[in-house]
Image (spheres, rainbow, N blue to C red):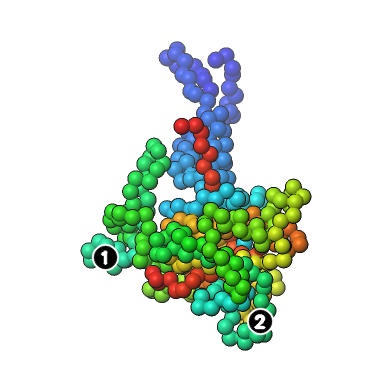
Amino acid sequence: MSGSVPGGGVKSEPNLTPILDMVFQLITFFMLVINFKSAELDLSLQLPVLGSAKPLPEGANLKLLVLNVQICTKCPHSGCDAFATLRRVTDADTKKVKSYQLVCERGHETDHPQGAITNGKTCLTVYGRLLCKESRSKDFPSIEEYLRSEADLSLMSATPPLTRDEVIKEGKELMDTVVIRADTGCRFGAVNFVIVECQKQGYRRFALKTGQVEIKTGS
Amino acid sequence: MSKRHSAEDVELNVTAMLDMAFQLLAFFILTFRPPPGEAQIFLKLPPAQPVAGMTGTERAGSDESKDPKDVKTTKSVVVNLLDRDSGSVTDVQIGIPSVSMKPVPYNDLEKELRVYFKAKEDNEAGQKSGQGDYEQVVINASPTLRWEEVMKVVDMCTKFTAGKGDKLPAVSLSAAGPDPGG
């Protein structure tokens, strides 16, 4: 795109079409790889690392119910009545845990000496909400209420639709897979509570999440 | 320069479109977060079948309303993991509760499981191990034990096959007593 200008000089314009093509290619790439599913994963959890666990098979068409199991405690910040969960502070270079913090729902951060909350409550993290054994408000149902509503949804979406009685009394099972993402430092009692609650609602298939084995690349 | 443009030649101004495309690109780059590499162990966890001789435990889904005589019991091997409130495994017992529970060192647990189940690697090598008619491993752990330790034992159990087929032994989890945390 160039042409003569009355003054005698040459006006040159860069051709923007190739750069626009390339930018559209990049946009398409990022749009395709964007993963909304990671919103339901609580990335602050440290999962146990085991050798025999396998990644999810490609193209597996499983309906998943992701449950992030943690232990929470009252926020130690004065005047705050929210619940706090443990977060690891890792070194950016070595990826090793430097220290631990309690981070509450309102964002208060308090240093915590140990790697586990010893006497806390069982809680589920669902899209950033902390659900405990007892209901706190309409937006924070109890673990049982939450699982019941999820089970109702999968009862309706099953083909043919199931009723609650068929599941509870006749032992029919829900086809959904419950994904248990529990922190390494979580107590077994807490995870077992969640599993038992799921079994009460008719879930039978479980996937226990583990982290991937780190491949050591020299020293 | 010498190219002649006709009077009707219309050129589209792509600068504005490029600006918008860069905005979109910036948004997608900033919100891009690669999914974490995770793996899983798939388990079918039915509510635990009653095990003869096991009492005083909170078992996953055990049906207490039925008369114990009417309930079919599964041939189960029980692994007790005790932690003495330390969070790590301190004592391990393995066996059949109505017969005998044998304390074993934690490092020998895999060897002891071989007594009851067939190891996958032995199957492949054509060797025979285990009696092969036990169907279930009940991992009966202290509620204060850390999840990591329980997963290590679940991992061990997935290396075996139960019964005559190649099926995994049914793993069932149960907590020995109530969770003190709540």
Q: Residue at x 52, y 42 (%)?
A: A214
Q: Residue at x 33, y 55 (%)?
A: A114
- In the picture of the structure, the residue carrying the numbered disc 1 is A80
Q: Chain of mark 1?
A: A
| Label 1 element class | loop
Between A214 and B5, which is closer to the camera in this rendering?
A214
Q: Chain of mark 2?
A: B
- In the picture of the structure, the residue carrying the numbered disc 2 is B71
Near mark 1 (Cα within 10 A), the count class, few <14, some 14-19 or many ≥20, is: few
Coordinates of residue A185 in the picture (x, y in percent): 42, 57
- Three-letter amino acid code of the residue under disc 1: Cys
Residue A163 shows in the view = no
- Three-letter amino acid code of the residue under disc 2: Val
Between B176 and B99, which is closer to the camera in this rendering?
B99
Residue B62 shows in the view = yes
Coordinates of residue A132 in the picture (x, y in percent): 41, 70
Near mark 2 (Cα within 10 A), the count class, few <14, some 14-19 or many ≥20, is: few
